Amino acid sequence: MRSRGLFSRCALILGLVFLYVPILSMIIFSFNNSRLVTVWDAAHSPTLKWYVALAGNEQVLRAAWLSIRIALVASTGAVILGTLAGVALARFGAFRGRLLLAGMTTAPIVMPEVITGLSLLLLFVALQQLIGWPRGVGAVTITLSHITFCMAYVTVVVQSRLAGMDMSLEEAAMDLGARPARVFFRITLPLILPAVASGWLLAFTLSWDDLVITQFVAGPASSTLPMVIFSKVRFGVTPDINALATILVLIVATGIAASTVWMRYQQRRRERDVLLAAAANL
Amino acid sequence: MLRIPQLSGRRVVAGIPILWLLVLFLIPFIIVFRISLSEVRLAIPPYTPLLTWHHGSPSLQLHWSSYAFLFTDSLYVSSYLYSLKVAAVSTLCCLLIGYPMAYAIARAAPASRSVLLMLIVLPFWTSFLLRVYAWIGLLKNNGVINNVLLWLGVIHHPLVLLQTDFAVYIGIVYSYLPFMILPLYANLEKHDGALLEAAADLGARPMRAFLRITLPQSLAGILAGSLLVFIPAVGEYVIPTLLGRPDQLMIGRVLSDEFFENRDWPVASAVAILVLLLLVIPIMWFQRLERRELEAQ
């Protein structure tokens, strides 16, 4: 018994090392003076010169701004559609089109991105021929594509949250005569809000990060940040990308830490409310 | 009478996402199939129409030449098979590394479980592209791994690690490991320890108890994790492009090159259809597992 526990624990530690060493090396070498990236120039390091270079890189900044705007719109759209789909799948029982909807929301998660990208571009081209819209490819087609593949993830998150929740509160509200829409906005939505919020964050990250699908549906004037990074790293390692990676890792780590603290705080407040309510009943 | 507005409200709630996905997910595949039956031509868009009009009557022209081309040129067949091999080996490696990790997390104290899970998921939130890029710095000839090994005196000449099959396996395992661990953990966490205790009381060795109890019970998790890695890995584009061999392409890269470099939309579409045909069964299998998992809750 003990030996097996030891083996899996070692595997866990080694696995975590495997997951984090590349990220750590990227962070360390972002402070390296040498152009050679992986050869540490001890005499002149650490230095912030790649961060300075990055701050003056017009192309990277413009691409980052475009990526942020697309990710904001796409994740919001994906959350609305994904929540509707998740509620339908988890609460409506059997309905016509249920199997179709279930299939169409899990397939995009595993579908190879080159296929999704190609099919979306061919759709946009066909639409343009048929109805004259969208005019060319660019931010609009990127956003529509991102909404489509991100909503699948939101659906799964919302659906599994609803599936794990009992329906008695919703049923009580209905018994008291509340209309379905009112039940949804007053009872269901507040209860699944954490799932909706993490679905939004997930969608934002996926949209912000996507390269392959975006490459198919982007025009020449709409380069997102991953596209700029890819065109740079395809021909070798460049130190300013290390600086960019470090900044992104820091933002994500801060975000995750902040949301963990916030959720702990919320949970503690809820527990206190329950205690107070119990005390008031005595 | 009062039920009618409720019904139509439901229809709207389910109808909007169904309509969206029909237009932006399902119909595109039909268009891809249609274009795979066209011939390439120099025009915008660069393919022939299927339906042409001759003296007022429609005539349907189906060209199977793109498919015939794919099967006669050995480049396509070999990259197809190579993609399957890479995806299968990577999935197996993910399973061998991910299973003990998921097992250790499921057996950890409840308080540390959420921290460990967060550590597994955290890299997933940082850019996928940048994490693959990080491996270039580690694997290249004058990269971190070679420098450390040279410094330790283990090797005297740098190893060729980048642009090899090995680098692709590393890249895929590294990027997809969380997708293997999470379903496995979700499964292993639900196991009842009493069964293992009973087996131990009856004199079963730990290894035997694991093989006869834990492993069969976790089969659904193994399948879900494996499909979640295997299916997207077959069509992987970024990892083999950045880390892999230049002389042996994976099918995702072939598709992308046909489309962007050769501008041969019919052949690119035919490649997509053939990959889809191969993946339809695993995708449907995955959906069934997913449905069962959600209904079990």
Image: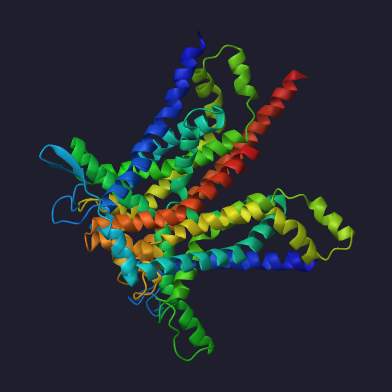
User: Furthest-right residue in view?
Assistant: B202
Residue in view at x 74 percent, y 23 percent: A279
Apparent side of residue B97 relative to residue B50 in the rendered image (left or right): right
Q: Is residue B169 above or below residue A177?
A: below
Q: Is residue B192 above or below residue B7?
A: below
Please count the marks in the image: 0
User: Furthest-bottom residue in view?
Assistant: B156
Apparent side of residue B133 relative to residue B183 in the rendered image (left or right): left
Toward the viewer: A96 or B102? Answer: A96
Residue in view at x 18 percent, y 53 percent: B46
Q: Is residue A69 visible?
A: no
Residue in view at x 65 percent, y 39 percent: B296
Apparent side of residue B170 relative to residue A273 in the rendered image (left or right): left
Q: Is residue A6 visible?
A: yes
User: Furthest-top residue in view?
Assistant: B1
User: Residue B158 appears at what percent x and percent y?
Assistant: 44, 86
Toward the viewer: A57 or B34? Answer: B34
Colour mode? rainbow
User: Residue B254 appears at what percent x and percent y?
Assistant: 32, 64
Q: Quadrant of the N terminus of chain A?
A: bottom right
Residue in view at x 66 percent, y 50 percent: B187
User: Residue A22 appears at what percent x and percent y?
Assistant: 48, 68
The quadrant where residue B12 appears: top left
Apparent side of residue B17 relative to residue A129 in the rendered image (left or right): right
User: Residue A11 appears at what percent x and percent y?
Assistant: 65, 67
Q: Is residue B124 above or below residue A102?
A: below
Toward the viewer: A36 or A99? Answer: A99
Q: Quadrant of the C terminus of chain A?
A: top right
